[in-house]
Every structure is written in C-alpha cells, then in structure tokens.
Image (tube, helix red, strand yellow):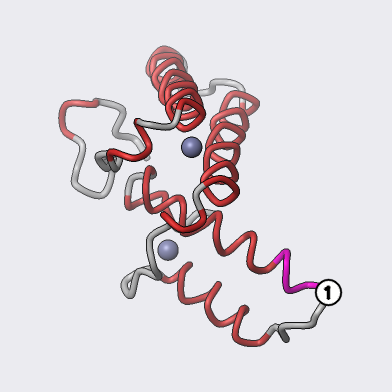
Amino acid sequence: MTNNSPDDLGPDDRWPLLPAWMWDCRECVRKYEAMKYLQAEIAGLVADDPGVDRDFMDSIVGTQISLSRHLADAHPEMLPGWDPDCRTCAGHRGRLAQTEESSEFRLGTVMVADEHRARHLFAPPRTVGLM
Ligand SMILES: [Zn+2]
Ligand SMILES: [Zn+2]
C-alpha cells in the first residue's frame, strides 16, 4: 500500500470501466463521481502526509457502501453473477446456501451478498473483496 502514483497502477488497482447502464442512471453517476472525487482528494492528502486522518479513509468506505447499496437496491437485475475467482463471492455464496429461505437472517444475507456483487462493477480487483 505504498504506491500512490496513479501512473503505474497494476491491473489489480485499476478501476474497471463502468457498464453503460450505470451512466444512464443519475444516481449511479452521482454516487460514483462522489466516490472518485473523494478518492482523488485523499490520494493527494496521503501523498503529502502519509499519517493522514483515518476518518478520511472511512469516508471513502462510506461512499463505496452508498454506491453498492444503491446498485443492489435499484438495479438488482443488473448485478454481475458470482465471480469464480473471488473468495468473498465464495464466502457469501456459502453463507446463502446455509441460510434457510424462511430464516430471519435471509434478507440481510442476501443484501450484503448483493452489495458485494455490486462492488465487482466499480471497485478495483484488489479492493473488491474487502467488503
Ligand atoms: Zn443507479
Ligand atoms: Zn466477489
């Protein structure tokens, strides 16, 4: 995590290209831009001062959650399927398989799984599995 130069990002750190339908949704665009804006701001701050306040990091996480929640909520039919190479996908899948349809936890389990799948649309491969 010492590499702050945007010029030599490896493929794992690259932001995927958003699917076209996300650009057609104002809410997606708004949340995505907010996240990227904050990300850029913070990259600048961290470059100046590596000990930058953790609260800033939390706000990046907040914007990411807000985007994936919106995606899971508003575009459930557009979410990508499970990624066979993603351990977090595998974990969510396993939990879903263990949760009964009728369980009171079912809804929450589906929700976090959907939010994670949504991350595959916009998060760099290295950070997709963090949530
Ligand atoms: Zn949207
Ligand atoms: Zn995944």
Q: Amino acid at mark 1?
A: Glu
Q: Nearer the viewer, residue 50 or 37?
A: 37
Q: Is residue 101 left or right of residue 123?
A: right
Q: Is residue 131 left or right of residue 129?
A: right
Ligand 2 within 8 Å of disc 1? The answer is no
- Residue underneath mark 1: 104
Vertical relation: 92 (above or below) 75: below
Please give the name of the residue rendered at 43% of the width and 22% of the height, measured from the top-left corner. 33
The answer to whether residue 69 is magenta is no
Residue 52 at what x, y percent from top left? 54, 20
Please give the name of the residue rendered at 60% of the width and 48% of the height, measured from the top-left corner. 73
Residue 48 at what x, y percent from top left? 41, 12
| The C terminus - image quarter | bottom right
Vertical relation: 24 (above or below) 108: above
Residue 26 at what x, y percent from top left? 46, 25
* Mark 1 residue element: loop
Q: Quadrant of residue 87?
A: bottom left
Please give the name of the residue rendered at 38% of the width and 37% of the height, measured from the top-left corner. 22
The answer to whether residue 105 is magenta is yes
Where are the magenta residues, as a range?
Answer: 104-108
Q: Is residue 77 left or right of residue 69?
A: left
Please give the name of the residue rendered at 80% of the width and 80% of the height, measured from the top-left corner. 103
Tag count: 1
Q: Nearer the viewer, residue 49 or 114?
A: 114
